[in-house]
């Protein structure tokens, strides 16, 4: 059976998963609690990484080194970068990059990581297709989109910045961990998928919307994830 690492940045994003787990063993490493056990008959390690790319990358590496995971899924909320992607919709990552990586002074493109073979990390095709199918079957009224996720250590709440992220990177949604998990997965040669439900529109209304819709969005991503892991 495959061992699935599941990372959420915030407690709310993973609480319901942890509550449903059986035969749980908890290990505290790098100030993160790793919940190892069974969820819906799948073998999982569920963990709150904390917010931002550094926490997310450290968390992923620990999942690989200490728990021997076969694949990693990042679940949580995100800000939409496109009109057609609405609050509570789901975005499945086709790939992910870091929008705040900037070595343009040395002639690199914005988002390009100097001296690395790649800066855009592709999610696993099998996981994307399976998640799309599971979403359509189990959440028929929720919009599901497949596209690029752009991550940075910034909460985006500015229409100009949002427009820039869309134009520069062709992003579908923005958040603060996914691309770091994607990069760590790539470096360790394991598949990944980012599942994000939309909590806000990443513009002037973002903070208010986030507070209002976070719970609804999380509900959708948790529902999808719990059904998905049964079928991996
Ligand atoms: N997570 C949820 N909404 C976000 C936003 N607008 N910017 C960054 N991360 C987010």
Image: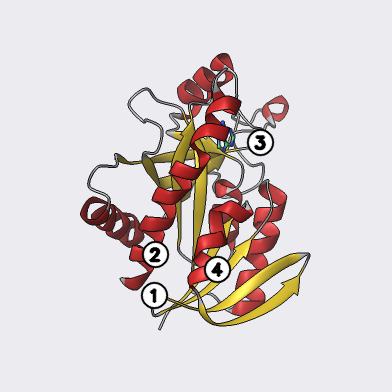
Q: Is mark 1 within 8 Å of ligand 1?
A: no
- Residue in view at x 53 percent, y 69 percent: 19
- Residue in view at x 66 percent, y 62 percent: 59
The reply to whether dot 3 and dot 1 touch (C-beta < 8 Å) is no
Sequence-wise first label, 3 or 1: 1
* Mark number, residue 101: 3
Cα–Cα span, label 4 and label 3? 33 Å
Mark 4 lies on a secondary structure that is helix
Q: Is residue 57 left or right of residue 163?
A: right
Mark 2 lies on a secondary structure that is helix
- Residue in view at x 72 percent, y 51 percent: 54
Residue 23's x, y, as percent? 54, 85
Frontmost residue, 43 versus 114: 43
The reply to whether dot 2 and dot 1 touch (C-beta < 8 Å) is yes
Mark 3 lies on a secondary structure that is loop
The 10 Å Cα crowd at callout 1, few under 14, some 14 to 19, many 20 or more, is: some
The 10 Å Cα crowd at callout 3, few under 14, some 14 to 19, many 20 or more, is: some
Cα–Cα span, label 3 and label 1? 38 Å
Cα–Cα span, label 2 and label 3? 33 Å
Frontmost residue, 87 versus 5: 87
Quarter of the rendered image showing ligand 1: top right
The reply to whether dot 2 and dot 4 touch (C-beta < 8 Å) is no
Sequence-wise first label, 2 or 3: 3
Residue farthest to the top, as pictured? 160
* Mark number, residue 18: 4
Q: Which residue is mark 2?
A: 226
Sequence-wise first label, 4 or 3: 4
């Amino acid at each position: 059976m495959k061992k699935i690492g599941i990372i959420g940045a915030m407690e709310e994003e993973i609480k319901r998963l942890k509550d449903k787990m059986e035969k749980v063993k908890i290990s505290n490493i790098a100030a993160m609690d790793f919940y190892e056990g069974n969820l819906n008959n799948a073998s999982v390690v569920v963990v709150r990484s904390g917010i931002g790319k550094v926490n997310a990358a450290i968390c992923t590496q620990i999942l690989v080194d200490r728990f021997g995971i076969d694949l990693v899924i990042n679940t949580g909320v995100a800000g939409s970068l496109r009109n057609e992607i609405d609050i509570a919709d789901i975005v499945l990552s086709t790939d992910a990059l870091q929008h705040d990586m900037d070595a343009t002074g040395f002639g690199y493109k914005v988002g390009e990581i100097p001296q690395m073979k790649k800066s855009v990390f592709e999610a696993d095709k099998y996981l994307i297709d399976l998640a799309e199918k599971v979403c359509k079957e189990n959440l028929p009224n929720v919009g599901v989109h497949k596209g690029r996720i752009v991550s940075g250590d910034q909460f985006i709440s500015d229409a100009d910045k949002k427009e820039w992220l869309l134009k520069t990177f062709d992003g579908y949604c923005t958040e603060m961990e996914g691309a770091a998990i994607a990069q760590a997965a790539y470096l360790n040669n394991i598949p990944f998928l980012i599942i994000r439900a939309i909590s806000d529109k990443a513009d002037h209304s973002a903070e208010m919307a986030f507070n209002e819709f976070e719970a609804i969005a999380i509900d959708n991503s948790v529902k999808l994830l719990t059904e998905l892991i049964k079928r991996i």
